[in-house]
Image (cartoon, rainbow, N blue to C red):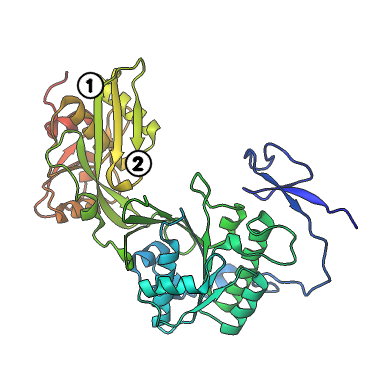
Amino acid sequence: MAKLKTSYVCSQCGYTAGKWLGRCPDCGSWNTLNEEVVSQPAAPEKVRRAPGAGALALPIGEIPDEAAQRLSSGIGELDRVLGGGVVEGSMVLVGGDPGIGKSTLLTQLSANLSREGSRVLYVSGEESARQIKLRANRLHAEKTGFFVLSENDMGIVEERMREIAPRAMVVDSIQTMYLTGLASAPGSVSQVRECASRIMTLAKASGCAVFLVGHVTKDGSIAGPRVLEHMVDAVLYFEGDRSSQYRILRAVKNRFGSVNELGMFEMTGEGMREVTNASELLLSGRAPDAAGSCVMCAMEGTRPLLTDVQALVTPTIFGNPRRMTQGIDVSRLFLLLAVLEKRAGLTLYNQDAYINIAGGLSLTEPAADLAVCAALASSARSVCLGSDWAAMGEVGLAGELRAVPHMERRLSECARLGFVHALIPKANMKNLSVPAGLTVHPAENLFEALKLAGIYNKRT
């Protein structure tokens, strides 16, 4: 009997080595090389060609302008994140923690598309057909007519896909699929890569939209090789605390739309319910007239969201003060604390500072700087910023306030929810249309802005 040949494959990037290495030479990850059996070449088969193989190279000006055909999923928040609907022939990878609601959302998607007359195939390698039927009963989707296949053999899945010719297909999950011609176990780098490649070939040739469910690792990233994320057209992450009923769907890659869009859902006993007024939800638990709280309007793609920026500044009992954040980069907090101390006269070197963005949002845009500084100053001086105030602006190292984009849309959202005062950079005042009922307070620098907000009227 011939000795089996093995190789070591990196689970992050797919790099192959002849021996085990502690660190991958290609991507630099530690302890990611796993041993796999190299399968012997099988009998010659018909070579699979990539989608579009054999096509002629055309000048770009001669390529016809054809808009991507989209299907409405029947779920407005999902359509928003996808860029306007489900694109025919696309591959979408959906990741998230176990129990977060991925299968529930995709079952609702399958039911909605079936109601509109589209053939849908739901393939599950983790659940039996009866388990899927029980979930469909709970979601009132048992009579919608989508097809269910409980199978993880990729060869059988391909046969059923050709027989049914679905317009959309769900694979739950890609890590459970396997090809019998490969000696490695399901979920390995080679299996995930080859199965995804087979699905992509069929999807592009038939125009079937495919949703792949992906497991996540401890750090929240999609498990398996990174090449999987490069192969698909869109990568969506389902986020949220399982102890809370609210979920956030975020796009981190989208070839057919913006990667900054965000969708919000509420997990109920009858499935995922859309949260259309997210700003009101995020501010629903805000304490009125509390020191250390400031509202700002963030832009998530084309969607303005009001969120509560909370700060707590307290004397430290340690040799080095603690700085902790939830929802913003901690290094950004270090920078803003230094600006407050140098340009606004606050003494913070001996104070613990904590920042929390209520609602579980993550703010990465610099427009949140002014709200963070106002919340920190409000907590440090125990002075309440009015509950009808909002603040938006980027803070520079010299203490200057810089303009931020989409100011009119941010102000309109503030006015819609009843805010009366808005603190903004003076640079945003040029040709600015202010909504009725909202008073804008422009400032050139941070110290002036804090004075206008009434946090303090003289330098201390």
Residue 231 falls left or right of residue 218: right
Residue 182 falls left or right of residue 287: right
**Other-residue count near label 1 (Cα within 10 Å), few / some / many at <14 / 14–19 / ≥20:** some
| Quadrant of the image occupied by residue 395 | top left
Which residue is nearer to you in this view: 180 or 332?
180
Mark 2 or mark 1: which comes first in sequence? 2
**Which percent across, then down, holds residue 245?**
31, 56
**Which percent across, then down, holds residue 31?**
65, 39
Q: Is residue 171 above or below residue 34?
A: below
The residue drawn where x is 21% and y is 49% is 283
User: The C terminus is located in which quarter?
Assistant: top left
SS at mark 1 in the image: loop
Measured Cα–Cα span from mark 2 to mark 1 = 24 Å
Residue to which mark 2 is pinned: 327
Residue 411 falls left or right of residue 82: left
**Other-residue count near label 2 (Cα within 10 Å), few / some / many at <14 / 14–19 / ≥20:** some
Residue to which mark 1 is pinned: 346
Asked if residue 215 can be seen in this view, the reply is: yes
Q: Is residue 82 above or below residue 113?
A: above
**At label 1, which amino acid type do we have?**
Leu
Which residue is nearer to you in this view: 260 or 172?
172
| Quadrant of the image occupied by residue 150 | bottom right
Q: Is residue 437 above or below residue 373?
A: below
- Marks 2/1 in contact by CB < 8 Å: the verdict is no
User: The N terminus is located in which quarter?
Assistant: bottom right
SS at mark 2 in the image: loop
**At label 2, which amino acid type do we have?**
Gly
The residue drawn where x is 36% and y is 55% is 248
